[in-house]
Image (cartoon, rainbow, N blue to C red):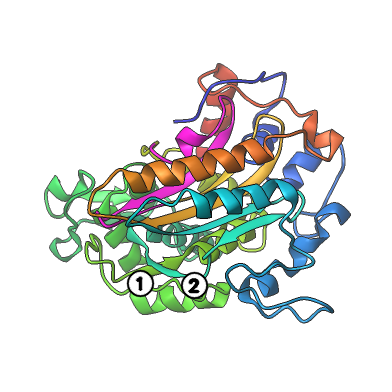
Amino acid sequence: GLRDGGGAGGMRPRTLAAAAFGCGALAAAAAGAARDDRVLSNELAFLRDLPKIFRGKWEGPGLHPLNPGTLIDLVRCGPALESVEEFARAKLPWGCSSSIAVVDLDTGDHAFVNATEVFPAASTIKLPVLVALYEAVDRGHVSMAEALELREELLGAHSGGMQYRPLGTEFTVGETAHQMAAVSDNTATNMLIARLGGFETLNQQFKRWGMQDTVLRQKLPDLDGHNTTSARDLAYLLTLVDTGHILGLRSRDRLLLTMTECSNEAMLRSSVRPGAHVANKTGDIGFVVGDAGLVTTVKGRRYVAVGFARRPYNEEAGSRYLRSVFERAHDALDTQHPDAAVAAIEYPVVGTALYDEFVEAMRD
């Protein structure tokens, strides 16, 4: 899970939500500055335009379409993340191709390497499904306590244990979401896809969010890679989630809490220093490996990191490469937060009673 480190101080659960996951409005409240969740502060004003920027349709002066390698005036690649781009290009292993997107949520700096290239999504497709679930909860269309029945046509092999339970077994939506996020259970994913209306309904939802390359075509497991996404799409989605453009505060915090339970630590989770908080979803179908997540460093910096690597079948070179790129990004961004109030927040120690209190509060 999460790495240990930092002091918990005297924070209560709702303040811990901001500290653990870098949710902007709650962090501001913890610092004593009241802020509407959907109105960004001046230093984050560029985020208002991220939907147009990620879609490559920015209409402001002097800005350019978002193509691989293109630098945008407003969202820029600063010196620190330039080194990440250079590293990602220089260290790509023989026989591999990659797609990288790193966005500093505090400054707007970014590193994009082939970020618009469409890749097989593998289990990272579960990330937009999870976001769609929490949006449905926000709208009152789904309850986390609702029961879902295990049906034969929804069984998914290879990942997770729900496939081995007797047909007709009932799981709550909350239990099913946990299994999808924590152990990447394919049966759980198929159950949630069905509950949310199926492929076409979800694909329309992804397009409404502005995702161009994310398409569900096949139930899980998708070993041939028919379901697709891109590093840009997932970075865009995580940015919208973090800035409150899609989910309400409670659902956003619950989503990110669920994502902290991801059990695969081979890439993004192993790239950060002790004390950093990672909410992510990985994917691996043999010839492609990927990871997408939101990181909050011990110093309060927040960034999105997404990477895919196409590799020789089951070669560890792909995951090692992504881990090294994520390490370079973490080294570049693990610096003092530009907002002194946010930098002063003490981060909770995973495993302490206070952190456990926060987790229980968010699950109530």
Q: Is residue 139 left or right of residue 160?
A: right
Residue 217 coordinates in the image, percent (x, y): 30, 74
Q: Quadrant of residue 138?
A: bottom right
- Residue 258 in sight in this render: no
Residue 6 coordinates in the image, percent (x, y): 65, 20
Q: Residue at x 44, y 57 (%)?
A: 127
The quadrant of the image that shows the N terminus is top left
Q: Residue at x 31, y 55 (%)?
A: 311
Q: Is residue 213 left or right of residue 10?
A: left
362 to 99, vertically: above or below:
above
**Marks 1 and 2: in contact by CB < 8 Å?**
yes
84 to 14, vertically: above or below:
below
The part of the chain drawn in magenta is 266-290
53 to 75, vertically: above or below:
below
Residue 126 coordinates in the image, percent (x, y): 39, 57
Q: Is residue 347 magenta?
A: no
Q: Residue at x 42, y 45 (%)?
A: 321
Q: Nearer the viewer, residue 204 or 48?
A: 48
The amino acid sitting under disc 2 is Phe
Q: Residue at x 74, y 49 (%)?
A: 79
Please state the total of marks drawn on the protein image: 2
Q: Is residue 13 left or right of residue 27?
A: left
Mark 1 nearby-residue class (10 Å; few <14, some 14–19, many ≥20): many
Q: Which residue is mark 2?
A: 206
Precedes in sequence: disc 2 or disc 1: 2
- Residue 352 in sight in this render: yes
Q: Quadrant of residue 28?
A: top right
The amino acid sitting under disc 1 is Leu
Q: Which residue is mark 1?
A: 216
Q: Which element carries disc 1, helix, strand or loop? A: loop
